[in-house]
Image (spheres, grey):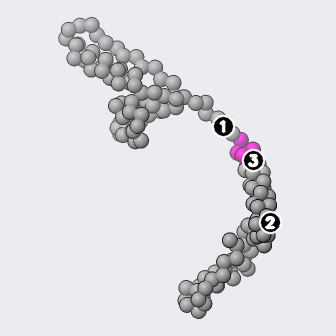
Amino acid sequence: VVALGDKHRDHVPYRQSKLTHMLKDSLGGNCKTTMVANIWPEAKMLEETTSTLRFATRMMRVSNEATVNVHLDPQLLVRKYERQIKELKQELAMHNTLANRSQIQYEEYTPDESRELESKVQRYLEGEIQELEVVSV
């Protein structure tokens, strides 16, 4: 609880108990939480009451920022990302044209091109060729 109240702390060491595991989201997570501290006004329960009040004071320092969980349709996300990729490719092609680099290809290599590249790299690693020509930069 002390770690949750410290705003500059990156890691909160939750104990490995069932209770703290269940309350993990409520204790400084994405939930609206209400703390109810039950105390007893008898002298024989003074130590327990004091401990409870100290705990409640520490819990007051913990702040939660609850946000609404949004569930999006995966098919809509795929279409959105495909459209975004298409727009980025067009922007990149326009930038390359303005920079006189119109021969650059951003599509995946064909199986033949992949085999040729692997062959060149293998020959380079074996010392048969001294330099590899980099075309797509």
| Label of residue 97 in the image | 2
Instruction: Give the left or right position of residue 23, taking residue 131 as reference.
Output: left
Residue drawn at x 34%, y 31% is: 2
Which of disc 1 and disc 3 is earlier in sequence? 1
**Quarter residue 35 falls in:** top left
In which quadrant of the rendered image does the C terminus lie?
A: bottom right
Q: Looking at this view, name the residue that lies furthest to the front.
A: 99
Counting from the top left corner in percent of width and height, residue 95 is at 76, 61
Q: Nearer the viewer, residue 20 or 8?
A: 8
Residue drawn at x 66%, y 37% is: 71
| Label of residue 71 in the image | 1
Q: Secondary structure at mark 3?
A: helix
Q: CA distance from mark 3 to mark 1?
A: 15 Å
| Three-letter residue code for mark 1 | His
Q: Residues within 10 Å of mark 1 (few under 14, many from 20)?
A: few
Which of disc 1 and disc 2 is earlier in sequence? 1
Q: Nearer the viewer, mark 3 or mark 1?
A: 3
Q: Which residue is mark 3?
A: 80
Residue drawn at x 76%, y 49% is: 79
Residue drawn at x 27%, y 7% is: 41
Counting from the top left corner in percent of width and height, residue 23 is at 43, 31
